[in-house]
Image (tube, helix red, strand yellow):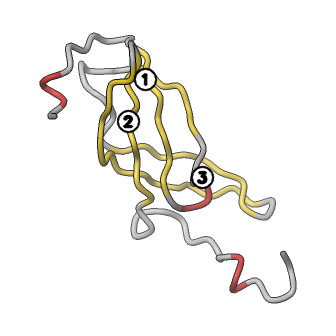
Amino acid sequence: MTDAAFPLSNGDKFIAIYQGGPNDGQTDTRFVTEGDFDAEITVITAVDGNEAMIDYTKSSVTKVGDEYHVTYVYDAKDSDQVTSHEDRGDRQ
């Protein structure tokens, strides 16, 4: 289903679900602007005590009851580089 199939108004709430990256599995309540869901979201996230700008791209939209759930997938190419747990040596 495309976004055009959803009757959206500015100020409508939706749940952003982050998939991948340091925010994997987290959710956020966001609001529709300019009549559509955000195509991309940049989230400032603390990674090992340092702030990083992490980019996510919209992948799918589902309506659950009266709520919209929008899945955003981690965009490593456009995000600040973060070190994975496996590459941190003995720091975990």
Q: Quadrant of the C terminus?
A: bottom right
Q: Position of residue 7 (x, y in %)?
A: 20, 13
Judge by depth and name the residue closer to the eye, 84 or 5: 5
| Amino acid at pointer 2 | Val
Judge by depth and name the residue closer to the eye, 82 or 92: 92
Judge by depth and name the residue closer to the eye, 22 or 46: 22
Question: Does the CB distance between marks 1 and 2 fall below 8 Å?
Answer: yes
The residue shown at (29%, 43%) is 60
Q: Earlier in the sequence, mark 3 or mark 1?
A: 1
Q: Which residue is mark 1?
A: 14
The residue shown at (69%, 86%) is 87
Left or right: where does residue 55 sit relative to residue 9? right
Secondary element under disc 1, as helix, strand or loop, is strand
Q: Position of residue 68 (x, y in %)?
A: 37, 24
Q: Earlier in the sequence, mark 2 or mark 3?
A: 3
Q: Quadrant of residue 66?
A: top left
Q: Quadrant of the N terminus?
A: top left
| Amino acid at pointer 3 | Asn
| Amino acid at pointer 1 | Phe
Q: Which mark is residue 75?
A: none
Q: Position of residue 30 (x, y in %)?
A: 48, 25
Q: Residues within 10 Å of mark 2 (few under 14, many from 20)?
A: many
Q: Which residue is mark 3?
A: 23
